[in-house]
Amino acid sequence: MDLAGTLAAAESASPVESLDVVARMVRDRLNAAAVSSLIVDFTGSSVVRLGAADSVESDEPPERVALPGTFYADVLRTQRLALQREGNGTVRVVAPVTNRGDTFDYVVDRDTMQLSVTDAMGHDVEAALLATLAVGALRRARRAGAELEVQALEANRAVIDHGRRGFVTGQLLRVSLLDGTTQFVNAGHPWPLLPRQERVEDDLPSLIVRTGDLHPREASRALVAEILHAHGRRLQDDATVMYLDWSGTHQVTRSADAGADLAEASAPE
């Protein structure tokens, strides 16, 4: 089965079974003995192994695996593929795949970068449809040349008219690639923190400074861990972290290669 066929089969399957479809394709293509997916939980402190069904089996128990000090933690942190030789002569390959959500949409043109992060109420199909509705309205307004506040108003109108009883929160950002000036619209989220010269004029200043040298992915994990700790590891509602690592306007070229930029990945702990 080629990639197009695999994606079509995964789309036709249920969400859980779609992992099995992809796992079987990978197994057949690489002639692997077993294939499974490791999903980082929302705390960032452990992974859950999802073994594939039928002919693709995992020899690991389907339970949480603590990340600190493990082989998997180094792979996640450095974003580099790693090999581990087993006692029976087989080789285990762990490949990092970074994912993002709830919805993240961006566009880069010659002079500006625009992005949006939205979070629709709930975790079911209705929430997915609501998120799609909001992103579609934002894109339509953005392509029409609307300013950020008009984009937000258009999304709000779409949710009111067609979103039934749901609601969406979000953040919109526009960055000039010429001079670095930024426009920001916040709709229902905590305001961003802006570190400058080792100081942050808001909550959690020392945490922001301590994570300043980390890759955004690792900094986000650290922030989430602190939030969980502050709430006794029992959140009463969703928590969203959006971390923007702005490198300035000096770059004139960009890399179009897929995957993480290994030069920016964090070192192993």
Image (spheres, helix red, strand yellow):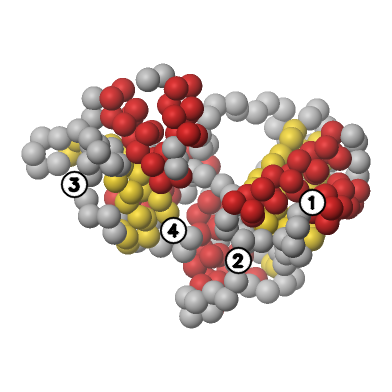
Badge 3: few (under 14), some or many (20 or more) residues near its Cα, within 10 Å? few
> Where is residue 79 shown, x and y percent of the image?
43, 42
Residue type, label 1: His
Q: Nearer the viewer, residue 201 or 51?
A: 51
Residue type, label 2: Ala
Q: Which mark is residue 218?
A: none
Marks 3/1: CA–CA distance:
47 Å
Sooner in the amino-acid sequence: mark 4 or mark 3: 4
Image quarter (top left, top right, bottom left or bottom right) of the N terminus: top left
Marks 3/2: CA–CA distance:
34 Å
For label 2, the SS is loop
Residue type, label 3: Asp
For label 1, the SS is helix
Farthest-out residue, left: 88
Q: Which mark is residue 162?
A: 1
Badge 2: few (under 14), some or many (20 or more) residues near its Cα, within 10 Å? few
Tell which tag, 2 or 1, sits nearer the viewer: 1
Residue at x 65%, y 28% (from the top left corner): 254
For label 4, the SS is loop
Q: Where, by quadrant of the figure, is residue 175 drawn? A: top right
